[in-house]
Amino acid sequence: MPQPLIDPVLTSVLRAARDAARAGRGLLLHLDGDELVVVAADGDDTARAIGHRIAAGRGVVGFVAATGQPIALRPTSTDERLADDVGADLGWAPGAVLAVPCAGEDGIVGVLELLAPLDGGTFDFDAVEDATLLAGVAAAALDASHVGAAVPTPTELGGGLERLAAADPARYVHVAGLVQALLDRG
């Protein structure tokens, strides 16, 4: 099965937001129909979050996607939004959460979520401001990226090259030369 494509631009924007807010973890979720999909993750134990899907109406990220309003909060035992959020799905219990909308030209395209301030406190107004600015950059990158695209397995790629060779030998020679050059660079 193909693996989700990890976009280095999205990861860089997320890392900048996480660093600015001094957060232990960060997630960037893309709105895909009625689901939010983690397309970038940065911080402690986040690699397994890539590709995780959550219903767009669930949790803190769902609230932000639906309302377009940022939210910064410290969890309480009575706040069910955190129990129903991506962090809970992945077994995390952050001391604080900050989520801001990624608003593109046609509306909300995603949510930038920061978890667990490194100082153990809460996210302050400056963190909300920084995350909001970077969420705008993330929205542009989400609009321009190939979110949802997947990297083919070697078998799938080989099959595609075989089909290309049969259908368009001249184009195959060009593509095979490019692939070989990339492999030689190793």
Image (tube, rainbow, N blue to C red):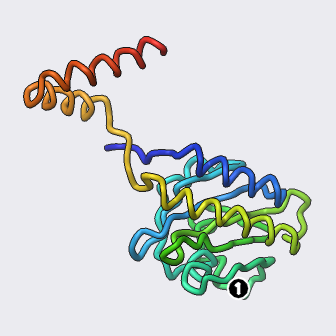
Q: Is 100 in front, or is 87?
A: 100
Crowding at mark 1 (Cα within 10 Å: few <14, some 14-19, many 20+): few
Q: Is 61 in front, or is 134?
A: 134
Vertical position of residue 22 compared to residue 103: above or below? above
Picture coordinates of residue 155 (x, y %)?
25, 30
Picture coordinates of residue 51 (x, y %)?
47, 55
Quadrant location of the N terminus in the rendered image:
top left
Picture coordinates of residue 119 (x, y %)?
91, 59
In the image, farthest residue toward the top:
184
* Residue at 74% from the left image edge and 52% from the top image edge: 16
Q: Amino acid at mark 1?
A: Asp
Q: Is 10 in front, or is 93?
A: 10
Q: Is residue 30 left or right of residue 79?
A: left
* Residue at 90% from the left image edge and 68% from the top image edge: 121
Q: Which residue carries the number 1 mark?
A: 79
Picture coordinates of residue 22 (x, y %)?
84, 57
* Residue at 40% from the left image edge and 44% from the top image edge: 3
* Residue at 58% from the left image edge and 77% from the top image edge: 84
Q: Is residue 134 left or right of residue 51?
A: right
Vertical position of residue 76 compared to residue 130: above or below? below
